Amino acid sequence: MVNKSFTAPAIVTGFPEHWRVCVPGAKVVSDEDTLQLEQGAHDLIIHAMSLHWANDPVGQIIQCRRALKPDGLFMAVAFGGQTLNELRASLAQAEVEVTGGLSPRVVPMGEIRELGALLERAGLALPVADSLPLTATYETPWNLMKELRLMGETNALTGRQRTMTQRKLMIRAADIYVEEFMSFGRIPATFELIFLLGWAPSSDQPKPLRPGSATARLADVLGSSELKLPGD
């Protein structure tokens, strides 16, 4: 929990029109490769549900860090690596069966450890990363794929197959999805949300102590007895 008020927020998003309505007092910019943010102008920047689409995610975070005031807060939420794992597996199996090959059909997304490491690489202090897997259910795989199109989360990879996907491949993928994952008459779809948090460096921030520099014993703080191992 962050107990702090913010007066100069900015939001990076693929849906600027929506956010301008929801947060009228914030500067809202599109998630382009070069962010239209002024250096040192903001005490809070939220990167909202578009970092997984970035060609250079660490570059995006670096730009946000430069746009923060000292001790400003960077927050991001993006889809993580477990997102749509059921659809990914079904499409892969169907493509191997139907065509004998395999092509990228679901955008690869980072794991929490990888995404958390980006915060330090970008020069942010006190980094925190957390994961929240959510499961939505649909009547059929076709309903899921329709919703993904409406969300703007379809396959936009440059390495994707450019020819028309065979109808029998999609039918087979839908059949596999139902056979492998359907439960109680509905198919599940995993959406893993990765939350990232880090602070722009500031001289008055807490600093980690140097290893071995402690002046108190943990056993004394906890009021417990310390048992030494044989040989200590």
Image: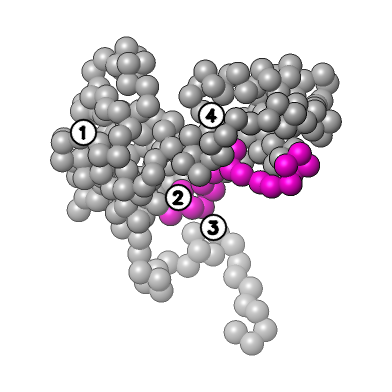
Give x and y (percent) for residue 142.
68, 20
Mark 2 element type? helix
Pick the front one: 25 or 19:
19
Report, in whole angstroms, how far the alpha carbon at label 2 lies from the one at label 1.
24 Å
Q: Which mark is residue 154?
A: 4
Residue on which the image places disc 1: 36
Q: Residues within 10 Å of mark 2 (few under 14, many from 20)?
A: many
Name the residue: 66% across, 17% down. Answer: 143
Amino acid at pointer 1: Gln
Lower sequence index among marks 2 and 1: 1
Lower sequence index among marks 4 and 3: 4
Residue on which the image places disc 2: 116
Compared across the picture, whether 80 is left or right of 73 comes to: right
Q: Residues within 10 Å of mark 3 (few under 14, many from 20)?
A: few
Report, in whole angstroms, how far the alpha carbon at label 3 lies from the one at label 2.
31 Å
Task: Specify the segment rendered in magenta.
Answer: 96-117
Amino acid at pointer 3: Leu
Question: Can you tell which quarter of the image residue 196 is in?
Answer: top left
Mark 4 element type? loop
Report, in whole angstroms, how far the alpha carbon at label 1 lies from the one at label 4.
26 Å
